[in-house]
Amino acid sequence: MIKIIMHGCNGKMGQVISQIVKDDPNAQIAAGIDIVDIRDNGYPVFTNIRECDVQADVVIDFASAKAEDALLDFCKERNLPVVVCTTGLSEDQIARVKETSKVVAVLKSANMSLGVNTLLKLLQDAAKVLAPAGFDMEIVEKHHKHKVDAPSGTALAMADSMNEALGNQYTYKFDRSQERKERDAKEIGISAVRGGNIVGEHEVFFAGTDEVIEFKHTAYSKAIFAKGAVEAAKFLAGKEPGFYDMSDVIAAK
């Protein structure tokens, strides 16, 4: 039984994770940490991280970037592995996350979905075969109208995954409206769509002569990221210090 401390337990993702763990016979939320204690979660909640004295095997972090520094100090002092899911970290904080991984096991990924991370591996395999055969690579990502950044971090991770498999020889093209010329063979096109309440869709096209191969991932709810975080926590518990990502979780399956 893996015992988890849920950092950001009363946030939306913290509540989704709490429900997923409740139904998981191999995991348990031992305690929660949040700036507010507004509901009965079925486990103790600490509004001050320094007051948390509950024994656990791993921390899942889905909170605010403002709370990240205190969390990293807490994990180092308690020798607790941590799955970092909080977004919006500064460059200094990301550097601190990596520094913390020298003391305890840390897992951080651009996307926590098991499906997306499996797809990243498949895209690398496909790119190695198809790109040298003259197939062009294009990515189209779709998200809800409230998402302010484009392209998505997942779309960039997909492009990076394929590019890495090809020796980082490719450039990324985000807009073709300002020039009139043929597509460069050494580019990966990335397009963004924003509208409605689309949770997240990513399509990758390998376009060759007389044939097109498509890969697609559709997220119907944010629960997929919560599920991935729980799987990551179960993987990370007991691991040696180091910087891990979801590819390590996939490889261990």
Image: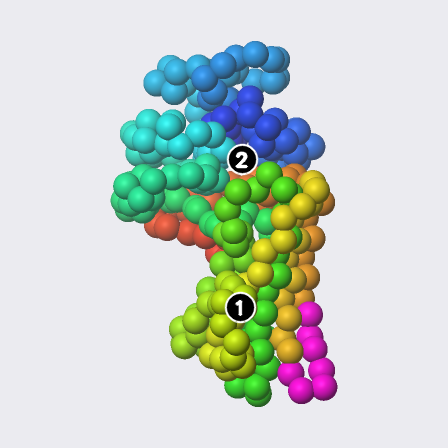
> For residue 176, which numbered disc appears in the image?
1
Q: Residue at x 33, y 27 (%)?
A: 70
Disc number placed over residue 97 in the picture, else none: none
Colour setup of the view: rainbow
Q: Position of residue 197 (x, y in %)?
A: 69, 40
Determine whether the residue tagged by mark 2 lies in a helix, strand or loop.
strand
Picture residue at 63% right of the left edge, 48% below the top: 194
- Quarter of the rendering containing residue 82: top left
Question: Mark 2 = which residue?
Answer: 2
Asked whether residue 209 is drawn in magenta, I would say yes
Mark 2 to mark 1: distance in Å? 50 Å
Residue 130 at least partly seen: no
| Label 1 secondary element | loop
Q: Residue 96 vs residue 207: left or right?
A: left
- The image quadrant of residue 190 is bottom right
Q: In front: 136, or 104?
A: 136
Q: Residue at x 47, y 20 (%)?
A: 34
Above or below, 145 against 9 in this view is: below
Q: Amino acid at mark 1?
A: Arg
Please state which of residues 13 and 17 is positioned toward the viewer in this rendering: 13
Q: Nearer the viewer, mark 2 or mark 1?
A: 1
Q: Which residues are magenta?
A: 208-214
Q: Position of residue 240 (x, y in %)?
A: 36, 47
Q: Does the CB distance between marks 2 and 1 fall below 8 Å?
A: no
For this view, does 177 lie left or right of residue 46?
Answer: right
